[in-house]
Every structure is written in structure tokens, then in C-alpha cells.
């Protein structure tokens, strides 16, 4: 009788200890599911972030276009560079008409890159390197005035 009790006790202990934890397979399965969920979330977030950066840069370009137009109205010519919006014209005759800075700081795009400004005759173009951060590629953001 004592022998049967010991066997029963051993059997109860071994079944209890086997069921008290997770198996390696169960832990790996849960880990794989978590990695997939995190991967989906990161992918969706990066797509949203890219769209936000593009929109923000487009807004910055629009505001800068208006600032260049204000300079043109005030000085009767386009600035040679974006720095002139802050520092004023370098020509001494035009400097006399300069009252104050139109902007305090030259903005950058959403990727913290400098904007490119080009004047051609009576028009101008402001360009951001865009998502790939390389100038003169298909994803560049531009505005003309």
C-alpha cells in the first residue's frame, strides 16, 4: 500500500511540474506573433511619418514662397538667396529701403536639409530634396513663383 501511495505521489508531481510552465514551442510561438505585430505597426507608422514629412515640407515651401513675394514687393526685386530674406539685400542702394528681417530663420525641410533656391529672370523655384534626401531626383518637392 505504501508503494502505491509513493507511485501515485510521483505521478501527481511529474504531471503537475510538466504543466506548471510553458514549453519552448509555446514561448517561440508567442514571440513570433509579437514580432509580427510589432513589424506591422512599425511599417504602418513609417508610412504615416513619411506622409507627414512630405505635407509639412509642402507647407514650409508655400510659406517661404509667400515670404519671397513679400520681399519682392518690399524691394521691387527677387532676393538672390534665401539669406537675403533674413539679412536684407547686399546692394547699398537697396539696403536703405530695408526696414527689418522678413523671417528670423531660414527654414529647413522636414528631414532637416537645406532648401535650394534658384532665380531665373522674374521667377524663382524653391526645392526640397524630398524623401530620399537627394537633390534633383523624382521625389523632390518644388514650388515656383
Image (tube, rainbow, N blue to C red):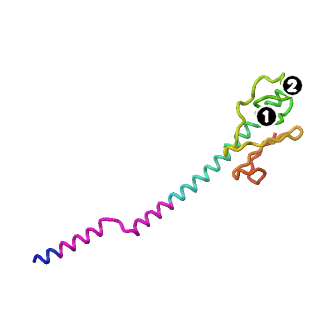
Circle 2 Cα neighbour tier, 10 Å, few/some/many (<14 / 14–19 / ≥20): few
Q: Which residue is mark 1?
A: 68
In this rendering, the answer to whether 32 lies above or below 115 is: below
Residue 71 location, x and y as percent? 80, 30
Residue placed at 15% from the left, 74% from the top? 6
Number of labels in the image equals 2
SS of the residue at dot 2?
helix
* Label 1 – label 2 distance at C-alpha: 20 Å
Residue 72 magenta-highlighted: no
Q: Residue 110 or 66: which is nearer the viewer?
A: 110
Q: Which residue is mark 2?
A: 92
Residue 83 location, x and y as percent? 77, 34
Residue 23 magenta-highlighted: yes
Q: Residue 77 or 23: which is nearer the viewer?
A: 23
Residue 119 location, x and y as percent? 85, 40
Relative placement, left or right, of 45 versus 60 is left
Residue 137 location, x and y as percent? 77, 53
Relative placement, left or right, of 58 versus 80 is left
Which quarter of the picture shows residue 39? bottom right
Which quarter of the picture shows residue 143? top right
Q: Which residues are magenta?
A: 7-36
Relative placement, left or right, of 34 versus 130 is left
Residue placed at 86% from the left, 28% from the top? 91
SS of the residue at dot 1?
helix
Residue placed at 81% from the left, 36% from the top? 81
Which residue of the protein is positioned furthest toward the left in this rendering? 1
The quadrant of the rendering that contains the C terminus is top right
Amino acid at each position: 500500500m505504501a508503494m502505491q501511495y509513493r507511485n501515485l505521489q510521483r505521478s501527481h508531481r511529474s504531471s503537475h511540474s510538466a504543466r506548471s510552465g510553458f514549453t519552448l514551442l509555446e514561448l517561440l510561438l508567442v514571440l513570433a506573433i509579437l514580432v509580427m505585430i510589432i513589424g506591422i505597426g512599425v511599417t504602418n507608422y513609417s508610412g504615416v511619418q513619411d506622409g507627414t514629412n512630405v505635407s509639412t515640407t509642402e507647407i514650409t515651401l508655400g510659406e517661404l514662397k509667400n515670404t519671397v513675394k513679400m520681399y519682392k514687393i518690399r524691394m521691387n526685386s527677387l532676393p538672390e538667396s534665401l539669406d537675403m530674406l533674413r539679412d536684407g539685400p547686399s546692394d547699398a542702394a537697396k539696403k536703405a529701403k530695408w526696414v527689418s528681417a522678413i523671417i528670423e530663420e531660414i527654414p529647413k525641410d522636414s528631414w532637416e536639409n537645406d532648401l535650394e533656391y534658384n532665380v531665373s529672370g522674374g521667377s524663382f523655384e524653391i526645392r526640397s530634396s524630398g524623401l530620399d534626401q537627394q537633390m534633383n531626383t523624382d521625389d523632390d518637392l518644388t514650388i515656383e513663383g
